[in-house]
């Protein structure tokens, strides 16, 4: 899901956003009407002082033939830019259009378990075996170290599974699991858990950071077990609604939600939604959105994402300061990696000097999706989403990270306006 990305300050699975950014501001001339040049269309209010962001998005998208994208930017708590971008698209993309955001979903799942801990429903140091049954297929034995996998280790990717995309990720091995268990596709969460219950851990729990979509699948099931609610319902009720976020939802593999964009890829593959073997366009059935709910299944607009990032601010109505400190704590005994960052709970974290003392970010990647969310130490945040992650150009999609840092650095005067009320009901 999170394709291997390398940026100027990061490596491996996650873009290493780390630079600083600009100063103060003014609203530029231009209104909310769409502006079109040839086949290029931008919606939302034009802000002249922030034109570097528009230029960066246009250059990035047109070089890769991306038809749909979005960007939202906040500064010192104010929403200063919200834009939808279209190129050769039949309909203009709005700032509120919905995109699959892939692994940006992990920040919601981590926050859900942290919120349950905040409310006294569990401890982050509880073992996962307290909440879930791990019954392997006949003839197989569960790893005796599973009781050492705590909720904290699950969320920090130190549970012991080496299951990222460079090895074996069960979230993308539907046919293997279905054949092994003798069950039909589309798989269920229970199918994946039963299969994985018979697989040994690759590392001692807590000893190694190894990115695991499966770990977050388990986290979603624990949210359901403890709360007594479906995963999506709990997240919406306890995390999103208090922030005024009503558009976000978990996505479906085939049928779009109202306002959801279409997805594009140069690749095809056999469907995992049934056993027919039908070849489908990669974003529409080569993976199951239902299966990926807690590790990558959410839909959002860029403005929803920067709104969601406010859950981690001081004074948040969703997470208290103790909970936020848990989210951004370094993995015990592991600390910061050689490139200067670490994985907290649902976020990558880079310690820096000044401001909040940290930059946080995450990327997301599916066939048909690339997403990035960044929150800086000095009061900036942005989210960018696109409706593809691959094209014949072969150009890097991770390059949007440095492009947006460069755009932020080019701002000489940050606007004083605030667009929150345009997109969210007070």
Image (spheres, rainbow, N blue to C red):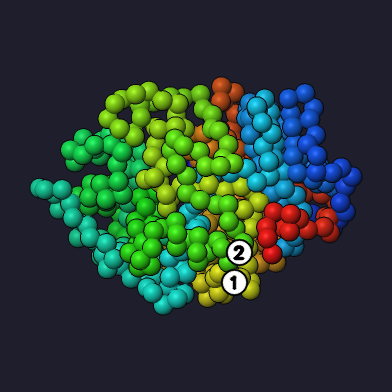
The secondary structure type at the circle numbered 1 is loop
Q: x and y percent of residue 176 in the render?
A: 26, 35
- Marker count (numbered): 2
Pointer 2 local density, CA inside 10 Å: few below 14, some 14–19, many at least 20: many
Q: Judge whether residue 423 can be spotted in this image.
A: yes
The secondary structure type at the circle numbered 2 is helix
Check contact, mark 1 vs mark 2: CB within 8 A. yes
The quarter in which the C terminus is drawn is bottom right
Is residue 332 positioned above or below 163 on the image? below
Residue appearing at x 83%, y 55% in the figure: 415
Residue appearing at x 67%, y 57% in the figure: 424
Q: x and y percent of residue 49 in the render?
A: 85, 47
Side of 133 where 39 appears, left or right: right
Q: Earlier in the sequence, mark 1 or mark 2?
A: 2
Is residue 196 positioned above or below 165 on the image? below
Is residue 257 positioned above or below 310 on the image? above
The quarter in which the N terminus is drawn is top left
Q: Which residue is mark 2?
A: 243
Q: Judge whether residue 12 can be spotted in this image.
A: no
Residue appearing at x 45%, y 76% in the figure: 119
Mark 1 and mark 2: Cα distance apart in space: 8 Å
Side of 369 where 374 appears, left or right: right
Rendered image: mark on residue 128 = none
Residue appearing at x 61%, y 70% in the figure: 316
Snapshot quadrant of residue 262: top right
Q: Which residue is mark 1?
A: 317
């Amino acid at each position: 899901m999170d394709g291997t990305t390398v940026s100027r300050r990061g490596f491996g699975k996650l873009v290493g956003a780390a630079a600083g950014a600009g100063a103060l501001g003014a609203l530029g001339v231009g209104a909310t009407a769409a502006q079109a040049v040839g086949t290029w269309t931008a919606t939302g209010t034009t802000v002249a002082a922030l034109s570097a962001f528009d230029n960066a998005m246009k250059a990035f998208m047109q070089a890769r033939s991306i038809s749909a994208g979005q960007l939202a930017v906040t500064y010192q708590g104010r929403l200063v830019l919200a834009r939808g971008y279209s190129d050769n698209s039949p309909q203009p993309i709005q700032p509120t259009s919905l995109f699959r955001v892939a692994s940006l979903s992990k920040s919601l799942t981590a926050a859900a378990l942290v919120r349950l801990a905040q409310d006294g429903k569990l401890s982050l140091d509880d073992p996962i075996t307290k909440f879930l049954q791990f019954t392997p297929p006949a003839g197989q034995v569960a790893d005796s170290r599973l009781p050492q996998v705590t909720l904290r280790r699950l969320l920090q990717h130190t549970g012991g599974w080496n299951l990222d995309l460079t090895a074996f990720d069960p979230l993308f091995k539907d046919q293997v699991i279905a054949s092994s268990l003798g069950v039909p596709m589309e798989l269920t969460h229970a199918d994946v858990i039963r299969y994985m219950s018979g697989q040994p851990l690759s590392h001692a729990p807590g000893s190694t950071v190894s990115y695991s979509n499966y770990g977050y699948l388990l986290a979603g099931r624990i949210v359901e077990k403890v709360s007594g609610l479906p995963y999506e319902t709990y997240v919406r009720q306890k995390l999103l609604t208090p922030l005024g976020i009503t558009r976000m939802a978990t996505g479906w593999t085939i049928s779009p939600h109202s306002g959801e964009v279409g997805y594009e890829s140069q690749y095809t593959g056999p469907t995992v939604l049934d056993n027919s073997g039908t070849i489908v366009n990669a974003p529409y059935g080569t993976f199951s959105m239902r299966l990926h709910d807690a590790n990558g299944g959410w839909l959002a607009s860029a403005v929803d994402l920067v709104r969601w990032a406010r859950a981690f601010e001081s004074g948040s109505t969703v997470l208290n300061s103790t909970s936020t400190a848990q989210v951004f704590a370094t993995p015990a005994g592991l600390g910061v990696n050689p490139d200067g960052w670490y994985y907290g709970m649902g976020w990558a974290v880079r310690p820096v000097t000044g401001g909040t003392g940290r930059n946080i970010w995450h990327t997301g990647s599916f066939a048909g999706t690339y997403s990035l969310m960044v929150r800086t130490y000095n009061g900036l945040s942005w989210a960018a989403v696109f409706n593809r992650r691959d094209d014949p150009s072969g150009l890097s999609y991770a390059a949007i990270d440095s492009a947006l840092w460069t755009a932020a650095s080019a701002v000489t005067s940050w606007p004083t306006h605030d667009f929150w009320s345009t997109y969210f009901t007070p």
